[in-house]
Every structure is written in C-alpha cells, then in structure tokens.
Amino acid sequence: MSQATTAAPKRLAVLLSGSGTTLQNLIDRIKSGSLRGAEIGVVLSSRSNAGGLDRAKKHGIPTVLVESRKYRKISAGSGCNKTAPDWEAMSEAVTEALIPFKPDILVLAGYMCLYKLPTAWQTGRCLN
C-alpha cells in the first residue's frame, strides 16, 4: 500500500492596485477549503492607499509596497502627459520585492501596472 503524502501548499503572491476584492475572494476560498493547496504568502500593491493592503493586514498576510508614482520618468513625447512610468525599473523592483517570499504563483488581481516577468517565472507561474 502506498502512503498518501501531502504536498506543501503553493505560495501565492497577489499583486493589486485597488480595493482587493479578488484578494478577498482568494482569502475566503482558501479559508473555506474550496481552494486547496494554496496559501497567500504576500500581497504587493502599486498604490499606498489600495484597500487590498488593509484586507491583507487584517488577515495577517505580509504586504509590500512598490509605488508606481515613484517610477515616473520624463517622456520625450509631446502632449499633456510628459511623464510615463519606467516599467522596466518598476518590474525589477517588484521582482526584487517578491524574491524573499519565494512565490510559486503570481496572481495579478487588479494590478494596474505593466509587469515584465523574469524569464524564469514565465512558464506556469502567473495568473491574470
């Protein structure tokens, strides 16, 4: 007879920019047992006033802030909007912030920024 083994839950990193309703759905599904084999290891937000940060803290989930406004650069273009996010620099900062949490899966849950996945994370590691 083979002995059943329990696999370690997949660690989710939830990236968000707003109220965190998708985060709350994940929390509720994990707690109810309808989403098995997953745990939320970290919540990363692009906005300091995102309600999702409060939801995460309420449930004891670590939070990280990588504010998109800090990655603005002057654009060479014309028109009203002369600043644009430096997505490359912000993507690097997001990746560096997530590495210590060793996420198995990234969940883009209302994350309103462009995120360039590192090559090693591009296969089967991200849900949008």
Image: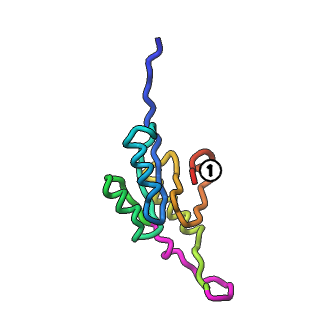
Q: Which residue is painted at 38% across and 40% down in the image? A: 32
Q: Position of residue 108 (x, y in %)?
A: 53, 56
83 or 51, which is in the foreground?
51
- Quadrant of the image occupied by residue 5: top left
Residue 125 in the image, given as x and y percentages of width and height:
57, 47
Task: Specify how the rendered protein is coloured.
Answer: rainbow
Please give the range of residues in magenta.
66-80
**Is 82 on the left or on the right of 48, as rendered?**
right
Q: Residue furthest top?
A: 1
Side of 89 where 31 appears, left or right: left
Which residue is depicted at the point 54% across and 63% down? Answer: 92
Residue in the foreground of this view, choosing between 81 and 8? 81
* Residue designated by label 1: 122
Q: Position of residue 119 (x, y in %)?
A: 63, 52
Q: Residue at x 52, y 47 (%)?
A: 105
Taking the magenta stretch, the answer to whether it contains residue 25 is: no
In depth, the one of 77 and 26 nearer the eye is: 26
Measured along the vertical axis of the image, is residue 24 above or below residue 78? above
Number of numbered tags placed on the structure image: 1
Residue 112: % across, % down: 54, 66
Q: Quadrant of the C terminus?
A: bottom right
Where disc 1 sits, the SS reads loop
The image quadrant that residue 62 belongs to is bottom left
Side (left or right) of 61 relative to 112: left
Residue 67 highlighted magenta (yes or no): yes
For this orientation, the residue located farthest to the right is 77
Residue kind at label 1, given as amino acid type: Gln
| Point 52% across, 52% down: residue | 107
CA neighbours of label 1 inside 10 A, class few (<14), some (14 to 19), many (20+):
few
